[in-house]
Amino acid sequence: MQSNSAAVLVRGFVNLLVSQLSVRLINFALNLVTARLLTPEAYGLASVQFHLLNTGIVFLSREGLKRACQRIQKDEHVHPQKVLALGCLCIPLGACITAIVCSTTLWRMDVKAPDAQVHATAVAMQGFAAFVELCCGPLYILAKVQLADAVVAVAEGAATIAKGALTLLLLKKSSMPVPIALSWAQVAYGGVTMAVYLAYYIPGLCKWTLSMPSDSFCLSKQVVLGPHHPRGSESQESESELRRRRLQGSEHAAGHAAEVQHQQRAAAVDDFLLDSRSLALCWRFLLQAIVHLAQTEGSRMVMALYQSSYNQGVYGLVTNLGSLVVRTIFFPVEEAAFRAFSRPPGKDVEADKKQKIQILAILVRVSGLTGLLAAAFGPSYTYVLLRLVYGQKWSSTEAPAALACYCGYITLLALNGCTEAYINAVADTRQLSKSIRWQAAFSAAQIILSFVLVWRLGAIGLILADSANMVMRIGYSWRFIKSAVPSLRLTAWAPSFVSCCAATAAAIALRLSKARFVDKYLAQNAGQGAFSQDVVCHVSIGMAALVGMLITMLLAEQNLRLDTKQLMSHSRQKLD
């Protein structure tokens, strides 16, 4: 089958964007209400400590297996039972990781603290909730491989609603300690996630046993019976061989039919067995998942170890709010790009490689333009945003300054996501091993830098350390891409000079506007009372500047418009 990377990218991005948008908006609304109810200290417990515990267990247990299954799926003859067989490894792996993480957390706990017993119970409940979620890990991996984005979106959305609703109910209507209330909500999240996946997949198995049409169910006969389809390539070969032998003599027909049936059963069993190549690929992606976790959550680890609960709450609020854009827009782009780059090549290998490089170039330029917008407008409006959305309690903390720094970090996140998606999709085993070693070195440098900067700059220092890590990772990704396509020029992938000048002018103008209107309001009212007319003027100036900058970018990025139009046209032709 001819590769269709453009169609896969467009279709995957649309599906993932819709699913992520619904889930993240629900999560944002519930987190907003929770942040208004909790103190910064209590919010730090939920957004940093419990987040680390759950993310560490779930991510390490299934992310490597998911990536490996997606790479293995490049072979078009791989069947879903192979995915399930590999996915089932996340359950014993998750049990071991849960035991290690929870034991380590309890061992480090101060037993003399007045709320030690409550925290110990909460840690045990958080570990149990993570393991419940992992019990449906094989079905989650299967859904990801089958591109069943709607199932994942329904599971995450329903679980998020259940978690948020129970959190609000327990915090407002009961006298339950905050750690226990948050832990019960996490248990509800895991339980609802499991229920959705089981409700989606189990009926397919049950109804198949009643000889219902296989195309009506998510688990078709292929999942249960293996590769011996009536129209499969192996079946066609066996049937043609059977007909040939029947022509030679009918006395051999019965014996050959039994032999073919035995071979088909053996092939079906083989799809459930784990070969050494698949296990080796799983191991490499597991190592990569460990390194990736250290890169993405290393700052939270440093914050949890050496900073107060108050600072943890500020950092958690900033990263949760900043990652709303990242997870809603950039994560679907990264996931769709990985799927597109992982497609098997068509008949024309060079044309397929050229198309994938074209897709990567478009993604890099769009990410750069998005980052320019965030860097130009974000720092001047962080205080206004936090004051309007989270209230004075949060706008009077270090959060506005940290969020302003995070706006520049968004650009690096976007660039790194699409470039690393290309490496993970096209790199061979040796290149993946080399990439893992380099990323491990980058993670070590990031953690060391976090220790140094967090003492002097607090949450801002951690964001700067994360930015330095992203710069190193982007540099390595560019070297990899440059080695694959030596003719590439960095300037061809960067935003145009006119766009950069427009962003710089907008940033300067908005900074002057902030000094004239917002800083004046803070000086006169000390952050108390309602916003004055001066702040409204500042917001109006920002809206006008945004419209002007978007028009400028649209006119200046002619090459990007032409390349995107060509890609979309090619995608529609393939989809038709």
Image (cartoon, rainbow, N blue to C red):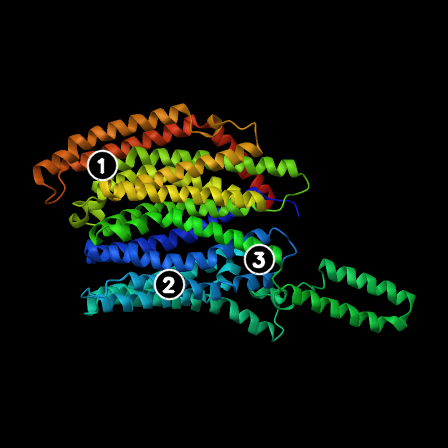
Q: Earlier in the sequence, mark 2 or mark 3?
A: 2
Q: Position of residue 405 (x, y in %)?
A: 28, 38
The residue at the far right in this view is: 248
Crowding around mark 2 (Cα neighbors within 10 Å: few <14, some 14 to 19, many 20+) is: many
Report the residue marked by disc 2.
159
Q: Find the residue positioned furthest to the left.
A: 524
Between 556 and 459, which is closer to the camera in this rendering?
459
Is the C-beta separation of discs 2 and 3 under 8 Å? no
Measuring from the top left, give residue 192's x and y in whole percent: 39, 67
Instruction: Between residue 11 and residue 324, name the one nearer to us.
Output: 324
Q: Which residue corresponds to the image point at 38% horizontal and 41% vertical from the top-left?
A: 445
Q: Which residue is mark 1?
A: 539
What separation in Å lies between label 2 and label 3 (alpha carbons)? 31 Å
Give residue 343's position: percent from left, percent from top.
59, 46
Q: Which mark is residue 279?
A: 3
Q: Is residue 77 left or right of residue 216?
A: right
The amino acid on which the numbered mark 3 sits, given as a three-letter code, is: Leu
Residue type, label 1: Val
